[in-house]
Image (cartoon, rainbow, N blue to C red):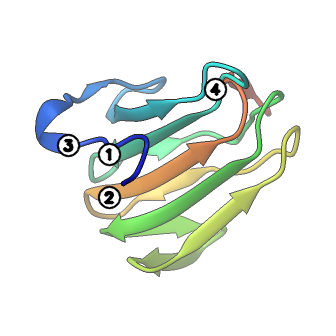
């Protein structure tokens, strides 16, 4: 038996850090502050280049098409951004849902 189970039917979407982005928190590590979320980008949304100063980020595309550095990526793509490293902009060509893990507190600083 798993010690923790999250069911999306018991969770809800919440406003994300940018217009057109929503988060569904699935788990929070109370020791590290890390979070696992489903992240939804609405088609046409551009998230500017930014930095997560306190956490490494892994994002796995579950559905949709995401453009990064003029390259299109679809479901089955895993991105990794080390703590403190600028990444983005991220452009949602279609509605995109990703499973995203931050191993520390989810803080954001604009890179520009």
Q: Residues within 10 Å of mark 1 (few under 14, many from 20)?
A: many
First in sequence: mark 1 vs mark 4: 1
Residue placed most toward the observer, 80 or 30:
30
Question: For residue 8, which numbered disc appears in the image?
Answer: 3
Identity of the residue drawn at 83% across and 50% down: 82
> Where is residue 11, by image quadrant?
top left
In this image, 54 relative to 26: left or right? right
- Please determine whether, in this image, residue 71 is positioned above or below residue 67: below
Q: Which residue is mark 2?
A: 96
Looking at the rendered image, the quarter that the C terminus falls into is: top right
Cα–Cα span, label 3 and label 4? 20 Å
Q: Residue furthest right?
A: 84
Viewer-nearest of discs 1 and 4 = 4
N-term mark: 2 or 4: 2
Q: CA distance from mark 3 to mark 1?
A: 13 Å
Residue 30 x %, y %: 61, 19
Is the Cβ of the residue at disc 3 closer than 8 Å to that at disc 2?
Answer: no
């Amino acid at each position: 038996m798993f010690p923790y189970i999250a069911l999306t039917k018991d969770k809800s979407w919440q406003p994300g850090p940018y217009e057109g982005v929503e988060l569904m928190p699935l788990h929070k590590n109370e020791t590290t502050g890390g979070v696992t979320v489903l992240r939804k980008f609405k088609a046409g949304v551009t998230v500017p280049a930014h930095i997560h100063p306190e956490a490494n980020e892994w994002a796995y595309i579950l559905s949709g098409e995401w453009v990064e550095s003029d390259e299109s990526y679809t479901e089955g793509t895993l991105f990794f951004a080390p703590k403190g490293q600028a990444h983005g902009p991220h452009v949602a060509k279609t509605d995109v849902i990703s499973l995203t893990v931050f191993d520390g507190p989810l803080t954001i600083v604009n890179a520009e």
